[in-house]
Amino acid sequence: MSPDESTSNGSTRLSTDVTEGVQYWGPAIAVSLTTFLVVINASLMNVAIPTMVNEFDTSVTVIQGAVALYSLVIAALVLPAGTLPSRYSRRRVMAVALIVYAGGTLVAAISWNTTILYLGWSFIEGSAAAVIFPLTHTELRVSYEGDDRAKAFGLLAGVSGIGGTLGPIIGGALTTYASWRWGFALQLVGVGVILFFVRYVSPKPLSETRSSPDRGGTVLSIVGSTSLVTGFLLSGKYGWIVERRPFLVGGVQFNPLGTSPAIWFLGVGLLAFAAFVQYERRLQRAGKSPLVPLRVLTNRPFLSGVITYNLRSIISAGFFFIFPVYVQAVLGYTAFETGLALVPYSLASILLSTFTTGWRKYISPKTLIQVGIVCMGLGLVLLYEQTGPSQTIGEMAIPVGIVGAGVGLILGQITNMTMSAVPTADSAEASGVLNVSYSIGYSLGTAIVGSFFLGQFYGSVVDGVLRAERVTVSAEQRNDLVIALEDATETATEAAQQQFLNQLTPTERQLLENIFEAAMFDAQRAGLALLVLLVLFLLIASTFLPRQIPGDDDRTDRTEASEGSTGKTSETAED
């Protein structure tokens, strides 16, 4: 064979290997990029809130309502949407969801008032995201086996972490130097790239027979998810049980027996899910197809993974609520610099979640998860110890990186462990349950940690002013002052706040600024202490996890990985 022929054959083999590699890993790339897009979208929105308030001439509450409604739509629809891959082509479901998502993004980008913004971002994008989220876990569960599945889930977790970190950086730069609308418009390019890799997703549905939709279960799941998330969102402002302030709907007050609306929404949500379980049980006994098979709801390894995943979501939501507020409000950094402060978290998260997936051959996945939990707690304790006026982004890099490393160790194992506990035929329904758990957990984390953090801050401000004025008030009067301060801060614009400060004498202004700063340090320490407590609960919950991924051992890994590679290649060839 001549040198030219040898070179030509080598190039051909290399090209073939690359093509087969892209075909094999195409589904993982598609779902990872999709998750990145959806995650970064939420971050872009949060950073742009002040600018959008000015552009639409509205209030912070109205724009934040779009964010809350987006989460609410996802939570309501994610469970029924998770069953679509069982009845229809997975490739078609993903492609249609991405196209609908792109349509919502376009509507949001050109929105000329808040109504159009709500339509495009909250409803259209939220509905598409509800289909996309569970489909990502489902596709990785059925497309890969053994080590390859673990690597795919690790990649998904790492990319998600990067999206959460880059969102504020990109959003801050676009909002500052161009327009927040470009943040939505550029996502259209991302959808185009993802659609290229979607063609490698299997066109086959998960089930050979198309079952009739479970309408009763769908209604109950929507009512349950919507009520729970709404209750959590309302709890911070209106209280968990006893009313903190009047709750008005269309000018009509709803505070029966002096209670908060949150407790009623939470009660309806819990009752709806209890009815959902009973309804699904009756449906399955009648030989029909329930929205979620009972074998999924009674699968102990799966449920232990869901609970662990849920608690981790609560902690992450709380951390991402208090950290940006503290860094910007007290330390004086911009949204762009806040994103940079989270880079160590992102890098550690993606490195540990991606490159530790194979460690389960030498260390139990349960042990890796528990080491990750301990790392999260250690990082939070270090941040607690550092909290003070001299704290800098550079000093926070190590503890923030340790928190990210802990999250990476957890996510590198927990999703694979949880989804591997169910049969392939139930993967779509299991993914829906996992994503509902995530949505509820994230809402719960924001509600618990957020309300605790803000309550500590406003309470410390009131106490500081009362001490400065040497005034003593009752507990009820103090609570009224805290609520009044919350309402004033929420409704006042930046210009109004500055106008108020300008009316004060330099001494009064300095006193108030010092009180605000001290109150924020107190609130940050209290918030971090609460997160550490939640980490301890997470560590306790992790003891119920199985030591190994169900059905996973070295021999099975090698066999399944080989069969998965062969099966995937042949399936792509058939397509």
Image (cartoon, rainbow, N blue to C red):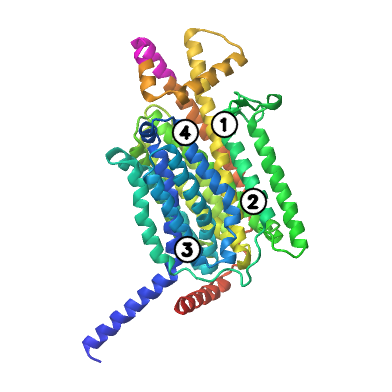
Query: CB atoms at circles 2 and 3 under 8 Å apart?
Result: no
- The residues tagged by marks 4 and 3 sit, at their Cα atoms, a distance apart of 41 Å
Observer-side mark, 4 or 3, equals: 4
Q: Amino acid at mark 1?
A: Gly
In this rendering, does residue 362 appear at all? no
Query: Is tag 4's residue or tag 1's residue first in the polypeptide sequence?
Result: 4
Residue 506: percent from left, percent from top: 34, 11
State the residue at coordinates (55%, 21%). 483
Q: Main secondary structure of the magenta part?
A: helix
In this rendering, does residue 566 appear at all? yes
- According to the image, label 2 marks what residue? 543
Residue 157: percent from left, percent from top: 47, 55
SS class, disc 4:
helix
Task: Identify the image quadrant of the N terminus.
Answer: bottom left
Observer-side mark, 4 or 1, equals: 4
Query: CB atoms at circles 4 and 3 under 8 Å apart?
Result: no
- According to the image, label 4 marks what residue? 62
- Toward the bottom, the furthest residue is 1
Q: Amino acid at mark 2?
A: Thr
- The residues tagged by marks 3 and 1 sit, at their Cα atoms, a distance apart of 38 Å
Query: CB atoms at circles 4 and 1 under 8 Å apart?
Result: no
511 in magenta:
yes
Q: Amino acid at mark 3?
A: Lys
- Left or right of 25: which side holds 548? right
State the residue at coordinates (55%, 67%). 142
Observer-side mark, 2 or 1, equals: 1
Q: Amino acid at mark 4?
A: Val
| 397 vs 244, nearest the viewer | 244
- According to the image, label 1 marks what residue? 236
Observer-side mark, 3 or 1, equals: 1
- The numbered disc on residue 151 is 3
